[in-house]
Amino acid sequence: MLGSLRSIVQQVNTARDLPSALDIIVRRVRDVMQTRVCSVYLRDKHSGNYVLMATEGLNQDAVGKVHMAPGEGLVGNVATREEPINLEHAEAHPAFQYFPATGEERFSAFLGTPIIHHRSVLGVLVVQQAERRRFDEGEEAFLVTLSAQLAGVIAHAEATGALATMGQQRNEAKFSGLAASPGIAIGRAHIVAPPANLATVPFACAMDVDAELALFQQALSAARSEIREVGERLKGELNKEERALFDAYISMLDDSSIAVEVCERIRQKLTASRAWAEVMLEHVRRFEAMSDSYFRDRAADVRDLGARVLMHLRQQEQSQRDYPNNTILIGEELTASVLADVPREKLAGLVSVKGSGNSHVAILARAMGVPAVMGAQDLPWEQVDGVDMIVDGYRGNLHLQPGSELRRHYEAIVAEERELARNLDHLAQLPGETADGHRIRLWVNTGLMADVVRSLERGAEGVGLYRTEVPFLLRDRFPSEEEQREIYREQLEAFAPRPVTMRTLDIGGDKALTYFPIEETNPFLGWRGIRVTLDHPEIFLGQVRAMMKASLGLDNLRIMLPMVTGVSEVEAARKLVDRAYDELLDEGYAIKRPPLGIMIEVPSAVYQARELSKRVDFMSVGSNDLTQYLLAVDRNNSRVASIYHSLHPAVLQALLQVVTACHETSTKVGICGELAGSPGGALLLVAMGYDVLSMNATNLPRVKAALREVNKSDLDRLLQQVLKMESPEQIEEKLQGYLQDLGIGGLMQPQQTETSSDS
Ligand code: PEP
Ligand code: MG
């Protein structure tokens, strides 16, 4: 059964469009389960009714004509109950409804299972049998499993269909994801595709057929010489059969029928890469469907060959591409490094199918003030290259091919945003303090040089977190000590005499260096942060030496260690920092010893905050990771993003515990997670007694504006009320209401986005 299940899902996955996907489902399920009928009903978005969309066994004329409202008939009942209905004699069931058009009087047994995607019922999958018998447990379990697996594929195919109609009729289409970086981007989609995956090559039209044909020939010959070269190099190490594989690759590339097919599609105005991917995928499928296992195994070779040629095609295409103004970057999984590829003045927005608002790329987007939507799982991203679109980073919505009314609506929001920013400009020169004079240090998080100017313009009083991994991510090898010194010097100099907190390299998790890959099943629980650098003292020492050298004559450096889980790590790291400092003194650098601090971002560090605080000069809570580890919610996973709450009562208790422990040992404590940059979160943190709030430069004026409106004594009362609450939703609502009552609800987002943007 598992084999059939896999092969059905695989086949459906490669269908061209929704109708062919549904046809495959009904045909294959009827064969595998040996039933007389298999049908799919899908919910019509406008009427909410379930419509027969495909069938094998019922009259074909009934397709598109049989409708059932939720709760109506057996199908409507499966949908409302959200569970299977398995009947020996369907007609005897009180909900049974007879539709003469289907000819279903001939069938007695009925089994229907709901197709559910993201908690919503997309449709119902039904099998029917002539004789009176109940489908057995195994059959029912098979259909339930299949429906669960097909739900995502159907949702994707539906979305793609909406897009296809959109292309023909110039209709708008809307997709939802997670609001990851606030703001509105109005621009044009530009796909960032992984270089060599045949299945994700965007559908795009060739602008210049001759140029595409030439590109194709160049890629073929580049791949040919590459394969010959590899074959030659490995000659001595391969046996006869393995050598034959290289010959087979070459002869496939020389196979004129493949080349003719590809050229034919290019002439029909497909890009070379799309044409090549389509033809090769068809060959892969042909091999996969063969009954002989030898030929089935060859499918992998064909795929590999396809990927090689594709890589050459993509390389040439990318080198010829220009980013238009207002580029909206779209990819399956955008990473922090893609941000560096597009000139900042051309980058308008970001959209990623995977990831969430807590992923590092989203954090950088917020720091750069670039609107972003992450986790847009149903967006057929491969097909939107060059499409006009709007990214609504406040609500997590994407509007493709927006009409003039929608465009005007969003242009008004952009104007409102500008106005809000202008109104906050004057705050840059004013101190971070509450209305009754309680002083709070408002610092910034940085990583890119671009952050520096924005931060200073907005009145940053220091840097609470400089993510040193960002310059590491943007290279193809570790930067040397001298290269690092230069980068760090720029930061320290730009902010001097204000303090700059440099965090030692925090790689691992979702921050992978291409030149230092870490393959792990559970990367967020694996080799991350201080664990990596303590295992590689040469990297750690080089980095802290570079930081300290860079601080020469400025003396505004603070060093901070990420992902600390216990005292032994702090002690080991301190020894290395001391050693580096002594070496530099010996080398003649007259530098001041920088304060050493740690991040509190895992539960063990919360419980040991007191012991840890005695060993360091300052502490800073990383609420992004702390939330992830306390709630056991992967910060990078869009499926669980709705239960990732930094305002969860358990997180607030942990934050309180840390501040209390630090004050007992008179250790200064700050917070540099995203919570500090939300006006509501900042109010609670000030009430708890945090000394420093460090946030992205975009949010700094909003947080300062909120704090300057309130009295510390009122915040203490607010905190007491919030600490009694039992759910994050209640707390979020309370804070929103509190800001609104103060007349500063608009600091969270422009007022217009709260009215319907779906109009
Ligand atoms: C955090 O975890 O809160 C933090 C500031 O570090 P990062 O987001 O870089 O992991
Ligand atoms: Mg962290």
Image (tube, helix red, strand yellow):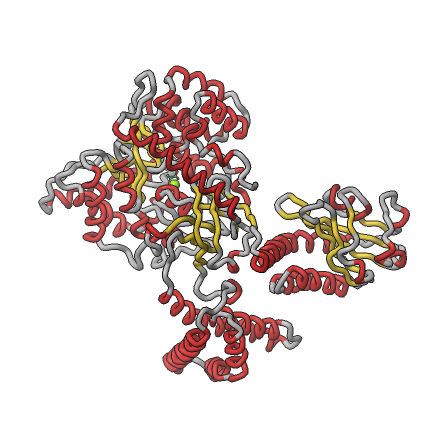
Residue 415 lies in what quarter of the image?
top left
Question: Horizontal placement of 431 versus 736: left or right?
Answer: left
- Number of numbered discs visible in the structure rendering: 0
Residue at the location (76% across, 46% down)? 78
3 vs 718: above or below: below
- On screen, residue 495 versus residue 405, left or right, reads left
Residue at horizontal 87 percent and vertical 55 percent from the top = 100
Indicate left or right for 64 with 17 as reference. right
Q: Where in the figure is residue 596, as x and y percent of width and height?
A: 25, 36
Answer above or below: position of 650 versus 573.
above
Choose between 555 and 62: the one closer to the eye: 62
The image quadrant in which ligand 1 is located: top left
The one of 192 and 204 positioned closer to us in this rendering: 204
- Identify whether 556 is placed above or below 325: above
User: Picture quarter containing residue 79?
Assistant: top right
Q: Residue at x 31, y 22 (%)?
A: 433
In the displayed image of the protein, which residue is found farthest to the left? 588
Query: Which residue is drawn at the image coordinates 84% and 57% (left, top)?
Result: 102
Image coords of residue 186 (percent x, y): 44, 48
- Tell me: residue 449, above or below residue 643: below
Q: The C terminus is located in which quarter?
A: top right
Asked if residue 1 lies left or right of residue 569, the reply is: right
